[in-house]
Image: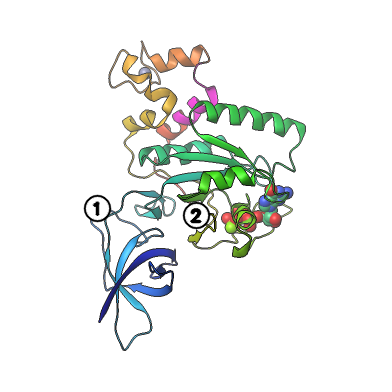
């Protein structure tokens, strides 16, 4: 019986594909009733996990018996009201959200929930604004505002058109020698952009429905893809909502960089920044030092009836 190690590059539930250090791909299954302490997740093994597996002579696949401790991981709710979470990926260097202003439209609520989650796991976040070839004048003005806002908060913002091939050098510079997760709604062009920066991959790209201007869930499982210029990108299935998991309401403001720096100036140390007197966050909001849209997304996260809610659409 031979013990080998590798990284999970694709996971479809109980089956996954493991890449060995030599670059070969091995189909593997989790051994028996595998559980990881502390996380109730629909997928005990995630893309990016480092695993050990054994091959036995009477089987054509490997059996994973060990998942190495994760350096980090990023989690969202598996289904609406579910108590279970879904590990999107493990051991990543950065989390990138792909945004489109139309076909489909991405709300700042979605962006902020994504960034708040990345902040909670101390994973650097970045934004890629795709489909810049189709925007109207008004949409371009909105794009400028969003890029200015998120850059000022410390998130790298890149403008791309996967279709026309613009912004690709900046994306390559961002991805080079790192493990990058890319997430966003279905149809924003995650796979199209990955194909554009790494043409050999030729992953399947889907159409946008004419009626709803939404994607059709072309990518159905997360997949970690090697980049010829160095690094890996994890392409993921489009998601409708980004549900927050393992959050304490008190903790949410700390995940907003612009509030984090002000909170200690609030009169009460358990300030929720909603109704308390002497709130430094509300003072900054009134003076325009905190963006009104970001603040309203903060309120929406804190007031979320279920707090942890999301859905694969
Ligand atoms: N006009 C324009 N269309 C684009 C661009 N990028 C992607 N598209 C189109 O958008 C559609 C969806 O692209 P995909 O790459 O499949 O989107 P995705 O984000 O991977 O979607 P899921 O896999 O469903 O999550 C395809 O028809 C692409 O050709 C772009 O920059 N401009
Ligand atoms: Mg895709
Ligand atoms: Zn406050």
Residue drawn 54% across and 26% down? 293
Figure quarter occupied by ligand 2: bottom right
**Residue placed most toward the observer, 236 or 103:** 236
Q: Which residue is mark 1?
A: 38
On the question of residue 305 being in view, the answer is no
Q: CA distance from mark 2 to mark 1?
A: 34 Å
Residue 264 vertical placement versus 80 (above, below) = above
Q: Position of residue 32 (x, y in %)?
A: 27, 73
Q: Which comes before the other along the chain, label 2 or label 1?
A: 1
Residue interval drawn in magenta: 289-298
Name the dominant secondary structure of the magenta segment.
helix
Residue drawn 31% across and 65% down? 51
Residue drawn 60% across and 58% down? 198
* Ligand 2 contact, mark 2 (Cβ < 8 Å): no
* Disc 1 secondary structure class: loop
Residue drawn 30% across and 56% down? 40
Q: Which residue is mark 2?
A: 230
Q: Is residue 11 magenta?
A: no
* Disc 2 secondary structure class: loop
Q: Residues within 10 Å of mark 2 (few under 14, many from 20)?
A: few
Give the quarter of the figure containing the C terminus. bottom right
Name the outermost residue toward the bottom: 58
């Amino acid at each position: 019986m031979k013990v080998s190690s590798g990284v999970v590059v694709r996971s479809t539930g109980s089956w996954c594909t493991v890449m060995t250090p030599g670059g070969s791909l091995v189909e593997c299954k989790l051994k028996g009733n595998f559980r990881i302490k502390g996380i109730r997740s629909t997928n005990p093994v995630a893309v990016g996990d480092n695993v050990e597996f054994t091959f036995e002579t009477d089987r054509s696949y490997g059996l994973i018996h060990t998942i190495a401790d994760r350096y980090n991981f990023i989690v969202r709710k598996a289904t609406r009201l579910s108590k279970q979470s879904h590990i999107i990926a493990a051991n990543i260097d950065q989390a990138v959200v792909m945004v489109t202003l139309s076909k489909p439209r991405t709300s700042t609520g979605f962006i902020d929930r994504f960034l708040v989650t990345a902040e909670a796991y101390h994973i650097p976040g970045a934004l890629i604004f795709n489909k810049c070839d189709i925007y109207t004048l008004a949409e371009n003005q909105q794009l400028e505002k969003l890029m200015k806002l998120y850059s000022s908060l410390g998130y790298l913002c890149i403008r791309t058109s996967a279709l026309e091939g613009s912004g690709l050098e900046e994306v390559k510079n961002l991805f080079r020698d790192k493990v990058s997760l890319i997430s966003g709604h279905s149809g924003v062009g995650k796979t199209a952009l990955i194909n554009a920066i790494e043409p050999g991959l030729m992953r399947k790209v889907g159409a946008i429905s004419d009626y709803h201007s939404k994607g059709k869930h072309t990518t159905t499982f997360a997949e970690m893809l090697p980049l010829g210029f160095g690094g890996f990108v994890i392409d993921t299935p489009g998601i409708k909502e980004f549900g927050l998991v393992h959050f304490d309401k008190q903790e949410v403001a700390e995940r907003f960089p612009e509030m984090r720096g002000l909170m200690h100036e609030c009169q009460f140390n358990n300030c929720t920044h909603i109704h308390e007197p002497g709130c430094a966050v509300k003072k900054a909001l009134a003076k325009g030092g905190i963006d009104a849209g970001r603040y309203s997304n903060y309120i929406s996260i804190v007031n979320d009836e279920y707090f942890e809610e999301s859905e694969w659409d």
